[in-house]
Image: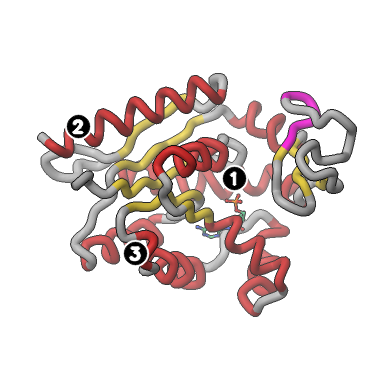
Amino acid sequence: MPAELNLVFVGPPGAGKGTQAARLVDDFGLPFIATGDILRANVAEGTELGVKAKEYMDRGDLLPDDLVVELIMDRLAQPDSADGFILDGFPRTVPQAEALDAAMQQAGRRLTAVILVEVPDEELIERLSGRRVCSKSGHTFHVKFDPPKHEGVCDVDGSKLIQRDDDQPETIANRLRVYHEQTSPVVSFYDRDNGPSGAILRRVDGSRDPDEVYRHIRALIATVRMEDTL
Ligand code: AMP
């Protein structure tokens, strides 16, 4: 039986984690658990969590750990995550990483790899400020790097393209600050020695062409899986 593939994507906002993770989902058929997407769905539906989350999200701040940890632990306990999962946007703080470690250990499981997608801040600012999102299905475009055929209109379903509230310049600056202050320590957390296979952190240069980044990630997963069977 193939080993479980329990993957975590870490990286600053705009690094392309979501895009890369979505391609892996297509290839491996694993559930894709993106905290930001789950929270945005809650905001759109006006749930109790969504009402609380919106305040933090609009400012570019992180939600309190307990709220997010509960949300993700419930999701990981669903049967479809039993053979593996791809987490995007969680953990974003050391306490979240510790909670995930504890839950995995309790379930007799472990993370296969933590993939860090790195991109310099200047490039992230350009990517995020030009990002436009389909108001209906979330397809993403970029005014410069991936413009829609007709300005302001989604190529896929003709819906209006909008700019996420948290892609406004002041919020972008805050999200990057929050990343460096609160999420960078998560990188060190996973870069520590993790037993016989060493550290589980794998670094990927996210400033390259998305296809190249994807090939690197695939190669890296193949290596980790091979090491797992040795
Ligand atoms: P994202 O789409 O991953 O950039 O997430 C959008 C926003 O959701 C973030 O700026 C935070 O406000 C919130 N969020 C997402 N993931 C987390 C997390 N793991 N912990 C706390 N807040 C989060």
Expressed as whole percent of the image width and height from the top left, the position of residue 226 reads 19, 32
Q: Amino acid at mark 1?
A: Arg
Tag 1 and tag 3, C-beta contact below 8 Å? no
Expressed as whole percent of the image width and height from the top left, the position of residue 89 reads 50, 51
Instruction: For mark 1, give the secondary structure.
Output: helix
Q: Which sits earlier in the primary sequence, circle 2 or circle 3?
A: 3
What is the number of the mark on residue 99? 3
| Residue linked to disc 2 | 226
Q: Quadrant of residue 74?
A: bottom left
Q: Which sits earlier in the primary sequence, circle 2 or circle 1?
A: 1
Residue 144 on the magenta segment:
yes
Task: Read off the magenta span.
Answer: 141-145
Q: Quadrant of residue 70?
A: bottom left
Nearer-the-camera pick, 167 or 22: 22
Q: Which residue is depicted at the point 72% across and 66% down?
A: 44
Expressed as whole percent of the image width and height from the top left, the position of residue 5 reads 31, 46
Q: Amino acid at mark 3?
A: Ala
Q: How many marks?
A: 3
Q: Quadrant of residue 43?
A: bottom right
Disc 1 versus disc 3: nearer the observer: 3
For mark 1, does the 10 Å Cα neighbourhood hold few (<14), some (14 to 19), or many (20 or more) residues?
A: some
Residue 54 shows up from this direction: yes
Q: Quadrant of ligand 1?
A: bottom right
Q: Name the magenta segment's main secondary structure.
A: loop
Q: Which residue is depicted at the point 69% across and 74% down?
A: 51
What is the number of the mark on residue 177? 1
Residue 185 shows up from this direction: no
35 relative position to 160: left or right: left
**Label 2, label 1: how many angstroms apart (C-alpha)?**
37 Å
